[in-house]
Image (tube, grey):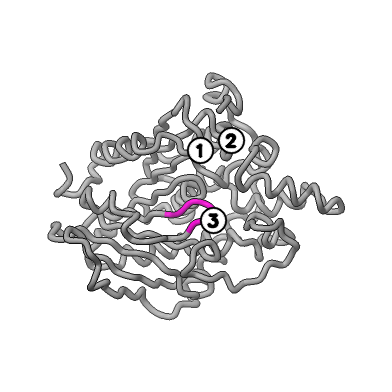
């Protein structure tokens, strides 16, 4: 993979001016208030009694998300650990869902409770019944509702992600003051969004090679992945005003969530990433307002970033900040 963006010294100074919508806060306040009002009740947890695992308890969860619609998740608890536990709410990369619970055992092995959140319409267990209001590029979610931020796909998904934090903080096994949001790529962008939308509920954020940041830059530079869906859409729909498209996406840009965050955060960026150009990551990182932020730079990393080395960095970073469970280390 070649280098895909600016040299590192320029990335460290890259602070683009991206104006946010004047009603950004009002838009999201209205959105989250409506979601919390339209609920089917508290989250539900069904224990998987025949899970062939001896060190964890696994629960098939449903919690109320956008418009009160049930969102699937896995809750994984380390067996025998002292409670209440710090928790990691884990968001998933683009086009993926929660998958199988055996894919998500790292955090429980370190002693954390883990809530693995399904992505509506992307996974198999949470449908997205809200129809698209504009033509969409085949196979993608980026262009769903591009004519109006009120109908855009990421309004629904980001709302689900906030409600996941609401739900896990109410679980009796979880310490509500030690909830960490985490994810890579789309999951990293979602973790960043939640850190900005409900900063008082997030103890730390792990933002790994994040997507959903600096959309215009991403659409201009990324060669593969979701950002090119925007370019394809604009290339096909010649009568659509690009400024109007990016005005819609502006309500979901990680740069705006970043400046509202207060929790410490560990970012990562890969300089050979063709999916999430490094400048989009640094733009969000530089705007991140929480104290104690840091970033790991993987010079020869592609979109997988630092892989397991980044996970090791995350575990150590959380421990240094007093967010490790008593059973870890």
- Residue 33 place in picture, x, y as percent: 51, 69
Q: Residue furthest front?
A: 52
Look at mark 3 in the image and give the residue it sits on: 95
Which secondary structure lies at badge 3?
A: loop
Magenta segment, which residues? 91-96
User: For this view, does 209 lie left or right of residue 108?
Assistant: right
To which quarter of the image does residue 19 belong? top right
Quick check: 260 left or right of 113?
Answer: right
Q: Earlier in the sequence, mark 2 or mark 1?
A: 2
Pick whichever of labels 1 and 3 is earlier in the sequence. 3
Other residues around mark 1 within 10 Å, as few (<14) / some (14–19) / many (≥20): many
* Residue 265 sits inside the magenta stretch: no
| Residue 259 badge | none
Residue 26 shows in this picture: no
Q: Which residue is mark 2?
A: 274
Q: Quadrant of the C terminus?
A: top left
Q: 36 and 148: which one is in front?
A: 148
- Helix, strand, or loop for circle 1? loop
Helix or strand or loop: what does disc 2 sit on? Answer: loop
Q: CA distance from mark 2 to mark 1?
A: 7 Å
Out of 89 and 254, give the one closest to the viewer: 89
Tell me the residue at 28%/61% (across/down): 76
Helix, strand or loop: magenta stretch: loop
**Residue 269, above or below 182:** above
- Residue visible at 23% across and 42% down? 322
Q: Which mark is residue 303?
A: 1
Tags 2 and 1 in contact by the CB under 8 Å rule?
Answer: yes
Identify which residue, 302 or 68, lies in the foreground.
302
């Amino acid at each position: 993979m070649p280098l895909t963006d600016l040299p590192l010294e320029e990335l460290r100074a890259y602070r683009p001016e991206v104006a946010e919508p004047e009603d950004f806060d009002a838009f999201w306040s209205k959105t989250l208030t409506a979601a919390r009002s339209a609920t089917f009740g508290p989250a539900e947890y069904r224990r998987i009694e025949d899970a062939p695992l001896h060190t964890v308890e696994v629960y098939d969860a449903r919690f109320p998300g956008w418009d009160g619609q049930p969102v699937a998740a896995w809750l994984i608890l380390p067996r025998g650990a002292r409670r209440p536990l710090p928790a990691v709410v884990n968001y998933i990369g683009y086009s993926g869902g929660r998958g199988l619970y055996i894919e998500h055992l790292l955090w429980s092995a370190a002693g954390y409770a883990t809530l693995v959140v399904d992505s509506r319409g992307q996974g198999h267990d949470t449908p997205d019944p809200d129809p698209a209001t504009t033509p969409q590029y085949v196979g993608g979610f980026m262009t769903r509702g591009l004519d109006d931020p009120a109908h855009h796909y990421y309004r629904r998904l980001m709302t689900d992600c906030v409600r996941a934090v609401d739900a896990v903080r109410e679980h009796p096994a979880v310490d509500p003051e030690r909830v960490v949001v985490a994810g890579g790529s789309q999951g990293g962008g979602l973790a960043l969004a939640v850190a900005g939308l409900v900063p008082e509920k997030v103890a730390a954020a792990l933002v790994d090679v994040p997507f959903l940041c600096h959309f215009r830059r991403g659409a201009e530079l990324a060669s593969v992945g979701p950002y090119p869906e925007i370019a394809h859409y604009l290339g096909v729909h010649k009568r659509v005003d690009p400024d109007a498209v990016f005005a819609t996406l502006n309500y979901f840009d990680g740069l705006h969530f970043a400046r509202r965050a207060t929790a410490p955060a560990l970012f990562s960026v890969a300089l050979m990433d063709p999916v999430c150009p490094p400048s989009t990551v640094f733009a969000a990182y530089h705007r991140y307002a929480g104290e104690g932020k840091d970033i790991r730079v993987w010079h020869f990393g592609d979109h997988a970033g630092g892989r397991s080395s980044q996970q090791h960095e995350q575990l150590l970073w959380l421990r240094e900040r007093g967010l490790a469970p008593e059973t870890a280390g």
